[in-house]
Amino acid sequence: MTIEIVGLIGVLGLFGLLALRMPVGLALIVVGTLGIWSLSNSTVALATLGDETWVVVTQSTLTVIPLFILMGNVASISGMSRNLYDAAFAFIGHRRGGLAGATIIGCGGFAALSGSSVASALTMGRVALPEMKRFEYDDRLATGAVAAGGTLGILIPPSTGFIVYAILTEESIGQLFIAGILPGLLLMILFALTVSAVCWFNPALGPAGPRSSAGERIRSLAAAAPLILIILVTIGGIYLGVFTPVEAAGVGAVLTSIVALLRGTVTISTAVSVLLRTVKTTAMTYLILIGAHVFTPFLARSRLPDLLVEQLIGLGLGAYGTLIVILLALIILGTFLEGLAMLVLTLPIIFPIILALGFDPIWFGVLMVIVLEMGLITPPVGLNVFLVKMIAPSVPLSKIFSGIAPFWVAMLAALILLILFPQIALFLPHQMF
């Protein structure tokens, strides 16, 4: 049996374990260890498992993960997400679809603290869906806006997706964070335009709300000011070179905690809950990264990535033709694989191809994260769709999937724009470095 066949069996076995609901990180560790064992011996396999585990858990750059997760959890319990939503509602709530637009803005702002699509969708969904229900918004637009807006959590920095991509490809976390700013704003604008377009065609989907007075707008903006300031300090500090991403995460976590303490929203029970959620999410992410670091050496030994590079380049599709094939494959995989799982499974295979084709790895990281976002709202998995279903159990899944369709098209448009104009993603990183 050739080493390539062993690699293929390992990949198929991995998909089999995932189908049996084995946790992603554990499945990667099992397949990677057994694969190296079969290609070398037990000593090499166990040494790789021990060494790679140590490498992951001792990387100081990975401390951004628990710190940003903590920052998002504290912001959630402190009411900052509600303040941001109220501020957006005060300024645009009187327009048709204004509440849905405010939800998109709120998700984008909260994403800049949490770095998580799940946290953004859950937090803003609990705030926005009851309000849209009160103003008789159509369920399709309401749930679609929350599900799609939540995906901004892995594009607008800080982003867990970018952190994992950086660790797996040895790229700069700071550059990836900065590269996500303009594409994140672009996607937010496209989502807002999507809301305006569907409400223009059918005004009944998103009735206009009451107009806020100048005083109400000022008060709502003042309430949201701490969150806006924290975002500017952390992300602006990275861009200006004042902070490293790790330092920015620490500063953001401290500032968010101070605001929560001053507001009196922190009790012993909420503090314990926040810390437990942070530890649980961090442990899950670390397990996936350890698994990826064990699985990648197995793939390298099997020569599958090299073989795939040769085959794709041999097709003569050209650089952009090959890129489109890769992105289409990732979009299809995203229909049944969870985002981080797809990232750690596919990057060891496709990243060498991207480098061989001469594409900028930072730019491709942004493209890949947008593809991950598309998977979050694509059936049959569509994690964000099921999260919204949990918040709004009375809304049928068919209606939620129908509601996210226009937003999925907006994401595809953003992907095409970034392929045509790479400087959208690369302009700020080039200015920064």
Image (cartoon, rainbow, N blue to C red):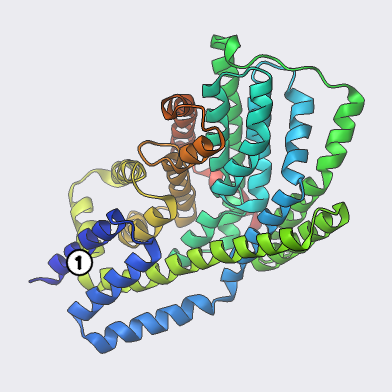
| Quarter location, residue 331 | top left
Q: Residue furthest bottom?
A: 43
- Quadrant for the C terminus in the image: bottom right
Residue 365 lies, in percent from the top left, at 47, 53
The crowd level at tag 1 (other Cα within 10 Å; few <14, some 14-19, many 20+) is: many
Residue 379 lies, in percent from the top left, at 37, 36
| Quarter location, residue 182 | top right
Using residue 130 as the reference point, say whether residue 420 is left or right of it: left
Q: Residue at x 59, y 43 (%)?
A: 122
Q: Amino acid at mark 1?
A: Gly
In the displayed structure, 402 sits above or below 385; it is above
Q: Residue furthest left?
A: 1
**Residue 155 visible, this orientation:** no
Residue 273 lies, in percent from the top left, at 66, 60
- Quadrant for the N terminus in the image: bottom left
Using residue 16 as the reference point, say whether residue 79 is left or right of it: right
Write down the residue under mark 1: 7
Q: Residue at x 86, y 52 (%)?
A: 263
Q: Residue at x 79, y 57 (%)?
A: 266
Residue 306 lies, in percent from the top left, at 23, 64
Q: Secondary structure at mark 1?
A: helix
Using residue 160 as the reference point, say whether residue 354 is left or right of it: left
Front residue (pair 347, 152) = 152
**Residue 365 visible, this orientation:** yes
Front residue (pair 324, 217) = 217
Q: Residue at x 71, y 17 (%)?
A: 95
